[in-house]
Amino acid sequence: DIQMTQSPSSVSASIGDRVTITCRASQHIHNWLAWYQQKPGKAPKLLIYAAAYLQSGVPSRFSGSGSGTEYTLTISNLQPEDLATYYCQQADTFPLTFGGGTKVEIK
Amino acid sequence: QLVESGGGLVKPGGSLRLSCAGSGVTFRDFYMSWIRQAPGQGLEWLAYISSSGHVTHYADSVRGRFTVSRDNAKNSLYLEMNSLRADDTAVYYCARDPQTGDGYTFDLWGQGTLVAVSS
């Protein structure tokens, strides 16, 4: 199985800051990497697919990058509504696997 | 939208059948998955079924105990869960794969249904 390691597990940042979350896969996943946002008590929401493509309706302050085994989600200009937990997911091979999550808190 | 139902309290060793009803979507055209989240924990993918229902994949943690199926005529997805254990306690989500050719991702999720396994 492909293991997905996310870091950090939590981050505290101020409004307007840039936040970067990293996801490392245990083997190459050919850019088949998705990022989700989950707010408390809600279902996850797809933000980024294929490592770098913004899902329709998602604000442009969210961006994804990376290749091979290393991928990054960046939130530029952090907003209060970005308080959430973010998960990466390898979309390459079954069994599909998620990272452990990164909780973003607002200072 | 997707709406799950069928969750509840069940004793260890018991069975439960979850349903996921699709409305406003062309259900039969999409691959579907079940994903769960234990209390305070992360996301765990469990099962996938092709649009026709002929192809399925499972996580090792549920293979042989859980069965995914679908009835496209009823716009419904199911998860039959047997031999339930305490560590199956979680919120269970159904989710749609948009099939954009960009890997197996999930662009539409239900609100989730809670399954609690306890004596």
Image (spheres, rainbow, N blue to C red):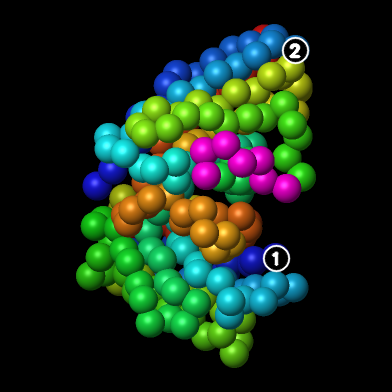
- Please state the extent of the stretch shown in magenta in the rendering: A50-56
Magenta residues: mostly which secondary structure? loop
In this rendering, is residue A96 above or below B65? above
Image point 31% across, 63% down: which residue? B58
Say which element carries label 1.
loop
Q: Is residue A37 magenta?
A: no
Image point 66% across, 41% down: which residue? A54
Q: Where in the figure is residue B101, as x and y percent of width and height? A: 52, 59
Q: Please name the amino acid that badge 1 sits on.
A: Gln
Q: Is residue A54 magenta?
A: yes
Tell me, for residue B56, which label it has, or none.
Answer: none
Res B6 visible: no
Say which element carries label 2.
loop
Disc 2: CA contacts within 10 A as few (<14), some (14-19) or many (>=20):
few
Q: Residue furthest bottom?
A: B73
Give the residue number, with chain letter if any, for mark 1. B1
In this rendering, is residue B5 above or below B101? below
Image side of residue B55 versus residue A21, left or right: left
